[in-house]
């Protein structure tokens, strides 16, 4: 029987089928952060249960920590961080705390430290665990009770998903990145359009992406509603894992962690890569995007009464006008960071845009490398100097920061942000904050122009 990559991964990790039809699956690796783990450890303590396999777990500090300096932490954040450190020490679990040269955002740290490889099953109390699908691994987010269960048993109850294949074939336009590809997919399928599915991305445009771009695609697939996102393992993914802890003994097999020829999916979506352009969001959902050289939609662009109502609400919140040129939208803040786009490749692309230029007057521009190692590598290459000379705030600590209002990097009411993050929900970056999602290079260009523009426009303007 020809199998999809998703089914291969699930079958390889199935311990048994449960009476109700769900599966019990084995978890190769489990990641925790300071925010989603405290209740799980409390549950273990109440039940007097230990951790079954401590070496198969990792804890990082990323969601609540301050990035300006460690002295900026409030008491609640300090307590969460201290509790996580104590819990890890009590159970002999690896802990990448503040000051550790390996510390950073969980989905940046794990690939960076070589802790993911093709064929693995990885769980974490964070929805963007889909990131690891870029390696041909099955990653998914879990809830607090599930965190407790995997700590105690190294297994999880799991319901098999339906499968969707998204084929993106052809060549992309110049300047189109992995961020643009996934934003286009979310726009086509819709937020929630993949609810209940494991989505496999395929096609020439996907194969042409380097690992950083593939991780961005799989990271934001959760905005489709997908519970899993996958890309077939190939030479690039094996090379990325080769010689590192989880991939030390791997040998490349083009068929092992890819869908079999003739495998059937429950749903198919085909997208022409040439239709994709550099995108920015105009609304309050990741599927509300438009070309950076385009205009804000009008009611005539909306096919249903529900869509028209959604347009009205989103534009009221965002303070925009139907038909307004995107390039006329001025920003207050430019933010480069998050588990979606704070890898060294992202910093390089943004630095190439800002080099020799200056941030526009009145714009606060912030760069937060995704990990301490990413920051070290960037500073070794001199990227920090490029950003600082341009007027960016180069933060000394790594963390989720302005991706979500869970730390002290909170946007003001009405503040408009060009952001390399993954979600633009109402209040996501702060109450009343207005978020425009885009690729880091576009964030950099917008910081220089003081308004939403792409790199090509910035060059044409001579700014």
Image (cartoon, rainbow, N blue to C red):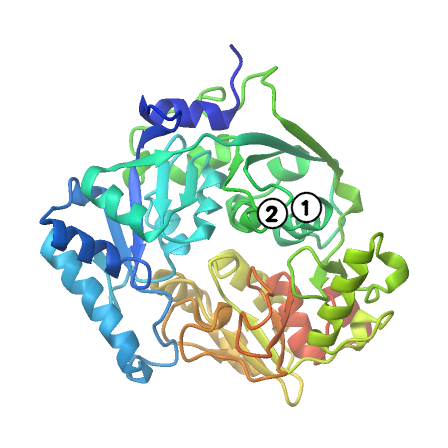
Q: Residues within 10 Å of mark 1 (few under 14, many from 20)?
A: many
Q: Residues within 10 Å of mark 2 (few under 14, many from 20)?
A: many
Q: Are marks 1 and 2 in contact (CB under 8 Å)?
A: yes
Where residue 158 sits, quadrant-wise, is top left
Residue 94 seen in render: no
Furthest-bottom residue in this view: 362
Give left or right: position of 225 versus 384.
right
The picture places residue 109, in percent across and down from the top left corner, at 36, 54
Camera-side residue of 362 and 457: 362
Q: Residue at x 42, y 69 (%)?
A: 379
Q: Residue at x 39, y 22 (%)?
A: 11
Q: Which residue is mark 2?
A: 224
Disc with the residue nearer the chain's start (1 vs 2) = 1
| Labelled disc at residue 185 | 1
Q: Secondary structure at mark 2?
A: helix
Quadrant containing the C terminus is: bottom right
Give left or right: position of 203 versus 308.
left
Camera-side residue of 238 and 79: 79
Give left or right: position of 168 versus 64.
right
Q: Secondary structure at mark 1?
A: helix
Q: Is residue 418 above or below residue 261?
A: below
Where residue 389 sits, quadrant-wise, is bottom right
Residue 159 seen in render: yes
The picture places residue 295, in percent across and down from the top left corner, at 84, 66
Q: Residue at x 70, y 75 (%)?
A: 318
Q: Is residue 83 above or below residue 303?
A: below
Furthest-front residue in this view: 20
Where residue 194 sits, quadrant-wise, is top right
């Amino acid at each position: 029987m020809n199998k999809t990559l998703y089914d291969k991964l699930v079958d390889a990790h199935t311990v048994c089928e449960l009476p109700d039809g769900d599966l019990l699956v084995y978890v190769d690796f489990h990641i925790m952060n300071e925010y989603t783990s405290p209740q799980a450890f409390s549950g273990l303590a109440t039940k007097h249960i230990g951790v079954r396999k401590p070496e198969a777990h990792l804890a990082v500090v990323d969601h609540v920590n301050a990035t300006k300096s460690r002295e900026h932490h409030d008491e609640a954040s300090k307590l969460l961080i201290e509790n996580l450190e104590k819990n890890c020490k009590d159970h002999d679990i690896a802990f990448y705390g503040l000051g550790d040269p390996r510390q950073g955002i969980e989905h940046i740290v794990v690939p960076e430290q070589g802790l993911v490889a093709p064929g693995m099953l990885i769980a974490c109390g964070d929805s963007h665990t889909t990131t690891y699908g870029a390696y041909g691994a099955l990653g998914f987010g879990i809830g607090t009770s599930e965190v407790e269960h995997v700590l105690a048993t190294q297994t999880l109850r799991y319901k098999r998903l339906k499968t969707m294949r998204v084929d993106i074939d052809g060549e992309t336009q110049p300047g189109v990145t992995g961020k643009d590809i996934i934003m286009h997919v979310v726009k086509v399928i819709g937020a929630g359009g993949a609810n209940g599915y494991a989505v496999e991305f395929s096609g020439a445009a996907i194969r042409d992406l380097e690992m950083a771009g593939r991780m961005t695609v799989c990271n934001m697939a959760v905005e489709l509603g997908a519970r899993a996102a996958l890309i077939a393992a190939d030479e690039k993914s094996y090379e990325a894992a080769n010689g590192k802890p989880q991939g030390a003994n791997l040998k490349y097999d083009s068929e092992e962690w890819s869908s079999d020829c003739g495998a059937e999916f429950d749903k198919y979506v085909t997208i022409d890569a040439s239709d994709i352009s550099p995108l920015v969001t105009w609304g309050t959902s990741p599927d509300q995007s438009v070309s950076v050289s385009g205009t804000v939609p009008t009611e005539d662009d909306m096919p249903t009464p529900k869509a028209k109502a959604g347009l009205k609400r989103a534009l009221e919140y965002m303070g925009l006008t139907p038909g307004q040129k995107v390039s006329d939208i001025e920003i207050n803040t430019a933010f480069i960071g998050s588990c979606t786009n704070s890898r060294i490749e992202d910093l390089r692309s943004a630095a190439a845009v800002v080099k020799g230029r200056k941030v526009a007057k009145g714009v606060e521009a912030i760069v937060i490398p995704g990990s301490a190692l990413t920051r070290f590598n960037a500073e070794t290459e001199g990227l920090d100097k490029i950003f600082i000379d341009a007027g960016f705030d180069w933060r000394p600590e790594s963390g989720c920061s302005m991706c979500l209002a869970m730390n002290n990097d909170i946007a003001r009411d009405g503040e408009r942000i060009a952001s390399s993050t993954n979600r633009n929900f109402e209040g996501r970056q702060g109450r009343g904050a207005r978020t425009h999602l885009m690729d880091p290079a576009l964030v950099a260009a917008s910081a220089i122009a003081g308004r939403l523009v792409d790199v090509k426009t910035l060059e044409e303007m001579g700014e």
